[in-house]
Image: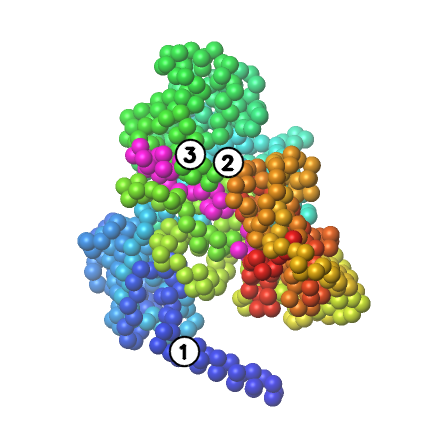
């Protein structure tokens, strides 16, 4: 009794404390993306039970329905009707502001959303939906406010690859709902690839009916392995997409034309344009399986790097492509369509008599120009059909007409944006380093995405004006279920939403993380299986001074998440003990902690091995015998594990002040840093290595952090017990195509600090 009363008392004080002060954040400060301008007034408005939503022109009826659907989870909506009298009014009117802008006025008497465009009305409606949801349960209604908001970019896209794994119409609609909520307005639908063809066409029904299905491939098998290794059911092929045919399991699916039209309409009601991608002339193995005569030779399959492409030398290939697109044009009303054009293995073309004849016919000097000729030929067909062509940035290689729009994805070719905009092409940015949702996530991924400055340096204002916008892509080779897709999209989706809507000057990382925390309940309510936040206070390698007592005390940055754990090496499940506070033990073991979603389904497992160690003694070297910094030995290393660096050609030696890539180190990079680390106090130190690609930290020859292997930027952590003084240290790091390395420590407040020059000697 006594304890409970005290706790309640403390909670009251906290609440009061939270409400005082003039700069009290309002619910509107938690809208994502953050609105441009929020002017708070006095008082509040509560949408009445049985509310009416009015819209001023028939065009807005679907927008009003979108708003009513969203609100009806919180408020009883009585009617949605045309007119200018209602509790909530949607008004199409000239605000004199940029395309997609909107204004919301919430007064004590009601709400009005005004915009000059349908898309702006949807953005305003989504702001209102978030506000209602964020204020639900406060009992306070909506504070009086005036919001005016303008997007930075007109193109705010999300891509879904439905070719590698199939996502059905219902799943696509759910994604469109989330896109609208976070103000994305372009859905890029990657419909065909080597592994599947998902769009039914009357001209070539076998492409979907046969090409939409496959026996499980190498990606599926890898997913199956991960399902077992990570005890994660979301890596299993969904049962409703597999069937047994004879002795084989067949996996797949495709969309009927009716489903496509329904999805396009559903998107349009949410202010979203749909951009179909039918990838050609590469990524076309499915086409060639059923139409092998469209290949240069009968070697259809995998080439050196990519699959064998269509033969642009044959007239029948061109006829096929045009018939496909003519049908696609009819299904998709938006002016932009996407031809692909990426990753073409051109070996066949060099040898093929048809391709050679085509090159001769048009005076083309090489196969890059042949690719350009094909793209240009198709662009003429698109233009004649009233469409505008988008393609991946490889299109630039053999020359490109200035009317095509370039989707820049290759982070390692940053001058593509300069080249494209210099010759007048529009560009959309999706650099894979930041905007590929398939990249593995760690605790830093969300902020890295949020803070990304992705417009390449050195563009003139005229060039910058050709950047239509930004999008995020999800490739699904290793994403067999919609739940796994959600995990890869969220919460990064929220950071990409901010990148699209707000300029880099408005970035406030700390405030953004607070907003994301406020949005987890919204994601929960929608049943989204987002990547739950990471634990603090446990690491990839934990030590205690043994023999003695170890204490594992992981914490999470948000409250209310269920955590269960095991100490016997098994995966925690819903019957494992609940984690409620620090766990003590006195012998080595591997603890496993697992978060659970509110619906009880399991999240990630965090593996935390604990080792009892004796602290390392410092080495005794007179200070005068040492110099500042570390020796960095450089190797021309092209392998996939830092353990092999020293077997590659040795280039030379640098002195670096700390663990950083020396100026003048040419790619491919393999670096071995050696020297001493100067430890200021006795203690257990927690190190992190944050690198792209792999790395290892050794102290006294012992592996402390293992971040090895090929990967995009990723953090790994590990502890060592060290007496004050100098300790021998080695960091092994490699990157074949340009990356980064950072070694730091995590202090008792969970703050990460890069280790600077004062820590190192050699
Ligand atoms: C791509 O990622 N191949 C566009
Ligand atoms: Zn050919």
Q: In the drawing, does residue 329 fall left or right of residue 228?
A: left
- Which residue is under mark 1? 19
Q: Does the rendering let one see residue 113?
A: no
Answer with left or right where residue 667 lies relative to residue 60: right
Camera-near label (1 vs 2) is 1
Work out whether mark 3 precedes mark 2 in sequence or the reverse, and give the earlier one. 2
Of residue 748 and residue 725, the one placed in the foreground of this image is 725
Q: Position of residue 634 (x, y in %)?
A: 61, 41
**Label 3's element?**
strand
Can residue 634 be seen at all in this image of the molecule? Answer: yes
x%, y% of residue 55?
A: 24, 56
Asked if marks 1 and 2 touch (Cβ < 8 Å), the reply is no
Q: Provide the secondary structure element on which disc 1 rests.
A: helix
**First along the sequence among labels 3 and 1:** 1
Does the stretch in magenta take in 425? yes
Question: Which residue in the protein does label 3 denote?
Answer: 392
* Marks 3 and 1, how far apart at CA: 50 Å
Q: Indicate yes or no whether the magenta region holds residue 109.
A: no
Badge 2 density bin: few <14, some 14–19, many ≥20, Cα 10 Å: many
Disc 3 vs disc 2: Cβ atoms closer than 8 Å? no
Q: Which residues are magenta?
A: 416-444
Neighbourhood count class around disc 3 (C-alpha, 10 Å): few under 14, some 14–19, many 20 upward: many
Residue that label 2 marks: 163
> Which is more foreground, mark 3 or mark 2?
3
State which quadrant residue 49 falls in.
Answer: bottom left
Residue 385 position in % (x across, y down): 30, 28
Distance in Å between CA atoms under marks 1 and 2: 50 Å
Badge 2 residue CB within 8 Å of ligand 1: no
């Amino acid at each position: 009794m006594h304890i409970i009363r005290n706790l309640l008392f403390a909670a009251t004080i906290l609440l009061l404390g939270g409400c005082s002060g003039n700069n009290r954040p309002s619910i509107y400060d938690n809208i994502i993306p953050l609105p441009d301008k929020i002017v708070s007034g006095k008082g509040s408005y509560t949408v009445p039970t049985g509310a009416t939503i009015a819209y001023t022109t028939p065009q807005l009826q679907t927008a009003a329905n979108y708003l009513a659907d969203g609100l009806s989870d919180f408020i009883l909506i009585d009617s949605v009707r045309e007119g200018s009298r209602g509790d909530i009014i949607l008004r199409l009117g000239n605000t004199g502001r940029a395309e997609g802008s909107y204004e919301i006025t919430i007064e004590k008497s009601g709400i009005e959303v005004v915009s000059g465009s349908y898309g702006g009305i949807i953005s305003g409606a989504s702001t209102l939906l978030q506000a209602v949801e964020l204020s639900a349960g406060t009992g306070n209604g909506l504070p009086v406010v005036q919001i005016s908001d303008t997007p930075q970019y007109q193109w705010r896209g999300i891509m879904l690859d439905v070719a590698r794994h199939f996502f059905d119409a219902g799943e696509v609609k759910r994604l469109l709902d989330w896109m609208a909520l976070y103000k994305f307005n372009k859905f890029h639908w990657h419909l065909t690839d080597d592994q599947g063809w998902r769009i039914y066409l009357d001209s070539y029904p076998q492409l979907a009916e046969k090409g939409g299905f496959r026996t499980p491939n190498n990606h599926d098998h890898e997913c199956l392995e991960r399902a077992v290794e990570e005890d994660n059911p979301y890596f299993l092929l969904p049962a409703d997409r597999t069937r047994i045919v004879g002795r084989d399991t067949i996996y797949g699916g495709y969309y009927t034309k009716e489903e496509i039209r329904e999805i396009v309409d559903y998107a349009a009601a949410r202010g979203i344009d749909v951009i179909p991608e039918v990838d050609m002339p590469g990524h076309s193995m499915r086409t060639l399986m059923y139409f092998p005569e469209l290949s240069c030779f009968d070697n259809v399959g995998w080439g050196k790097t990519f699959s064998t492409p269509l033969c642009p030398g044959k007239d029948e290939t061109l006829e096929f492509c045009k018939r496909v697109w003519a049908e696609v044009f009819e299904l998709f009303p938006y002016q932009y369509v996407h031809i692909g054009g990426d990753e073409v293995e051109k070996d066949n073309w060099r040898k093929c008599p048809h391709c050679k004849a085509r090159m001769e016919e048009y005076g083309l000097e090489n196969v890059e120009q042949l690719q350009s000729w094909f793209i240009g030929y198709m662009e003429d067909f698109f233009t004649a059909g009233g469409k505008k062509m988008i393609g991946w940035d490889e299109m630039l290689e053999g020359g490109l007409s200035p009317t095509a729009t370039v989707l820049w994805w290759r982070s390692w070719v940053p001058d593509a944006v300069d080249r494209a905009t210099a010759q007048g092409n529009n560009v959309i940015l999706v650099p894979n380093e930041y905007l590929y949702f398939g990249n593995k996530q760690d605790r830093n991924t969300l902020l890295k995405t949020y803070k990304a400055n992705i417009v390449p340096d050195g563009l003139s204002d005229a060039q910058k004006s050709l950047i239509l916008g930004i999008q995020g892509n999800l490739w699904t080779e290793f994403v067999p279920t919609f739940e796994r897709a959600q995990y890869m999209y969220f919460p990064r989706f929220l950071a990409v939403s901010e990148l699209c809507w707000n300029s880099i000057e408005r970035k406030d990382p700390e405030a953004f993380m607070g907003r994301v925390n406020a949005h987890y309940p919204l994601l929960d309510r929608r049943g989204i299986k987002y990547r739950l936040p990471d634990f603090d206070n446990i690491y990839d390698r934990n030590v205690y001074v043994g023999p003695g007592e170890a204490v594992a005390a992981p914490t999470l940055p948000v409250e209310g998440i269920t955590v269960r754990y095991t100490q016997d090496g098994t995966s925690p499940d819903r019957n494992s003990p609940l984690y409620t506070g620090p766990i003590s033990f006195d012998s080595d073991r591997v603890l496993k902690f697992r978060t659970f979603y509110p619906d009880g389904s399991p999240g990630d497992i965090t593996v935390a091995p604990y080792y009892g160690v004796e602290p390392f003694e410092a080495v005794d070297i007179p200070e005068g015998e040492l110099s500042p910094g570390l020796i960095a030995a450089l190797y021309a290393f092209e392998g996939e594990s830092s353990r092999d660096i020293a077997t590659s050609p040795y280039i030379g030696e640098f002195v670096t002040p700390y663990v950083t890539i020396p100026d003048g180190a040419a790619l491919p990079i393999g670096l071995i840093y050696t020297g001493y680390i100067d430890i200021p106090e006795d203690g257990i130190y927690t190190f992190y290595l944050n690198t792209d690609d792999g790395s290892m930290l050794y102290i006294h020859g012992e592996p402390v952090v293992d971040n090895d292997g090929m990967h995009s930027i990723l953090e790994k952590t590990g502890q060592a017990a060290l007496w004050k003084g100098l300790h021998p240290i080695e960091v092994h790091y490699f990157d074949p195509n340009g990356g980064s390395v950072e070694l730091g420590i995590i202090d008792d407040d969970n703050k990460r600090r890069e280790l600077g020059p004062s820590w190192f000697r050699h």
